[in-house]
Image: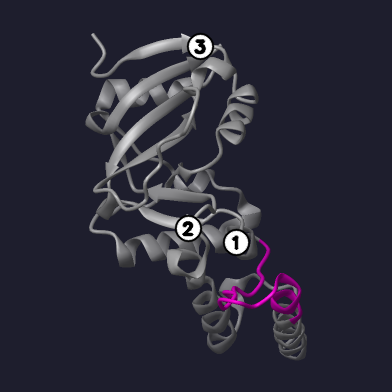
Amino acid sequence: MHPFPVRDAEPEQAVPAGRMGYDLDTERLLLHTVQSAEAFEVLLTTGTLTTDPDLAEAEFRDAYDWIHRMMAARLPTSGEGALWLWARTRRKHLVDSCRRSRGQVLLTCRVPRERVLLSHFDEWHLVLNRALGMPRPPGESEDDAFARWEEAQDDFNARLRAAGLRDAPIRNWTPDLRNEIETSWECILDRANYGPSECWQATVHALNTNEVVEATRIT
């Protein structure tokens, strides 16, 4: 007997029709994640799912190291890696993800807000691409914001080149340059910097069976 409902469904039926029901202000956040069949079995067998940070793409080691340190600083939980979930996305996006994940399992979860680190999905790519984070003030146009960011990024890149560090891993940068870019990234963790309909991702140290509402094997 499973500790939560388990069903089989095609991608279109794996995600309920209608509004997704995300609410980033509630005490227990609605989250979705697609996990491998093997990970699902680990969850069922042990009652807890964690992850191995060594499985993260080596190319993005510095980005994942930063998010792990943000989790350690901001969450009451602990762990070496991060499980990634959707905290707010569009139904079409989640269905498309299921279409690419046949044979895997969509988990619908409710996790206490204090155990979740939220980050802006699109702006996370600034971290992956080693680019400065820079929130857009209210009233600033998209073109003006990009021009301001581009000027700041060009200046930052010039200082990196002058230091001979343009192609070096961030972990090998001088402390001042590393601190500057990593501090700039913290804007992607603050919902106040973005509009009400943005897509947000979530990271947690672990997922427990009592936080899973439903599991759907994607056929």
- Of residues 13 and 208, the one drawn nearer to the viewer in this rendering: 13
Q: From this view, report whether residue 150 is shown above or below residue 31.
A: below
Q: Which part of the image, by quadrant, shows the C terminus?
A: top right
The residue at the point 30 percent across, 37 percent down is 110
Main secondary structure found in the magenta portion: loop
On screen, 133 above or below 156?
above
The magenta segment is: 129-147
Q: In what element is the residue under mark 2?
A: strand
Q: Quadrant of residue 45?
A: top left
Determine the image quadrant of residue 41: top left
Q: Earlier in the sequence, mark 3 or mark 2?
A: 3
Q: Position of residue 114 (x, y in %)?
A: 26, 55
Q: Can you say which quadrant of the picture contains the N terminus?
A: top left
C-alpha separation, residue under disc 3 versus residue under disc 1: 32 Å
Q: Is residue 145 magenta?
A: yes
Please tell me how crowded label 2 is: few (under 14), some (14-19), or many (20+) other residues with Cα within 10 Å.
many
| Whether residue 190 is visible | no
Whole-angstrom CA distance, mark 2 to mark 1, is 8 Å
The tag on residue 9 is 3
Disc 2 + disc 1, Cβ < 8 Å:
yes
- The reply to whether dot 3 and dot 1 touch (C-beta < 8 Å) is no
Front-most of residues 31 and 65: 31
Residue 119 numbered tag:
2
User: On the rendered structure, is 74 left or right of 128?
Assistant: left
Please state which amino acid type lies under the numbered disc 3.
Answer: Ala
Marks 3 and 2, how far apart in space?
29 Å
Q: Which residue is mark 1?
A: 123
